[in-house]
Amino acid sequence: MPARLLVTRLKTYRRKTYRPGQVRSVRGAIAFVNQRGFVFFWPIQGVELPSLWVAAAGDRSVGAEHDDPGHVTWRWKDSLLGERQWYYAKLLRKRATLVSLEVAPYFYALTENYGALEEDYLIQYEEGRMTQEAKRIYEAVLNEGPMDTVALRRKVGLSSTEGKARFDRALLELQVDMKLLPVGVAEAGAWNYAFIYDIVARHLPELPERARQITEPDARSKLLELYLRSVGAAPAAMPGKLFGWRKGDLQRAIEDGVSAGALRRDLTGASGEWIALAELQ
């Protein structure tokens, strides 16, 4: 497909899937996430993916003013924390991500979590794949129950200015690996606003069991197809950038999608190889 024609068709396709300015209620937001499978909360520069912000506020930059009407998305997100309507955490690209509960097991299947709350993290720590700070935070929530970030920092001894950076990195590490997620908001800290965190497998106990039935190749194939169903087509390297997959794993997922007839390769000259939905002609 010529590059110019591809761009035109992609714009038309993405207007349908990104739904700029069309989501106007929290129920509409839930339906949007369920339809797409996973979206960013805010648009992320350099990474193509629908976002709740664009769906609610239109295709424009995130408003800097506190009272920007687009920030209703923040209220929607906070109102649903802990309600099991979707999975929300810093996940893809270490940024705020919304995932439908039907799709969350496919992400979980690609983690090192197997459902054993008191064992998985210790294996990772002993093998040097979890930081000491992350271990302390996880154990605090495991033993004490859901905790807000202010209480959690105090509990693990990272309340100092220097400790805040270490705490934030460890908390991010635990979210990316789907060990912790925010389940509420507490009136705590300088802004009277602090996320309350719980262990993923305790808050969503059915998630590990559902993920256990999914192989890693099947999980990647599913997520790649869902991604292309949102964006239509993308440079072949883009899904690896989004999901953080190794090159070999990405290539296998692409080959599986092409073999199944769901995806196709698109060579577009100087712009390099692209992959696209087979139905996007």
Image (cartoon, helix red, strand yellow):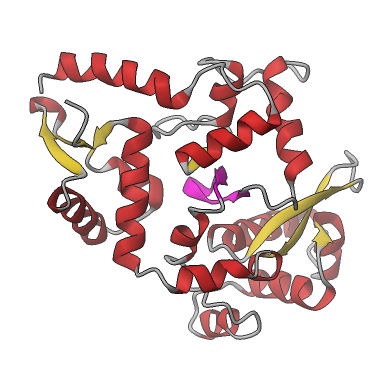
If the image is split into quadrants, where does the C terminus sit?
Answer: top left
Q: State left or right for residue 225 relative to residue 77.
A: left
Toward the viewer: 242 or 160?
Answer: 242
If the image is split into quadrants, where does the N terminus sit?
Answer: top left
- Residue at horizontal 91 percent and vertical 48 percent from the top: 188
Toward the viewer: 188 or 267?
Answer: 267
Q: State left or right for residue 186 relative to residue 277.
A: right
On the image, the x and y values in percent for residue 38 come to 49, 43
The image shows residue 33, relative to residue 25, as above or below, that is below
User: Where on the picture, by quarter, is residue 122?
Assistant: bottom right
On the image, the x and y values in percent for residue 131 come to 59, 72
- Residue at horizontal 54 percent and vertical 38 percent from the top: 33
- Residue at horizontal 65 percent and vertical 18 percent from the top: 63
On the image, the x and y values in percent for residue 280 come to 21, 28
Toward the viewer: 13 or 180?
Answer: 13
The image shows residue 255, relative to residue 71, as above or below, that is below
Q: Is residue 94 magenta?
A: yes
Q: Which residues are magenta?
A: 87-100
The image shows residue 272, relative to residue 225, as above or below, that is above
The image shows residue 18, relative to residue 69, as above or below, that is below
Q: State left or right for residue 104 relative to residue 229.
A: right
Q: Is residue 246 magenta?
A: no
Figure disc tally: 0
On the image, the x and y values in percent for residue 134 come to 64, 69
User: Where on the picture, by quarter, is residue 140?
Assistant: bottom right
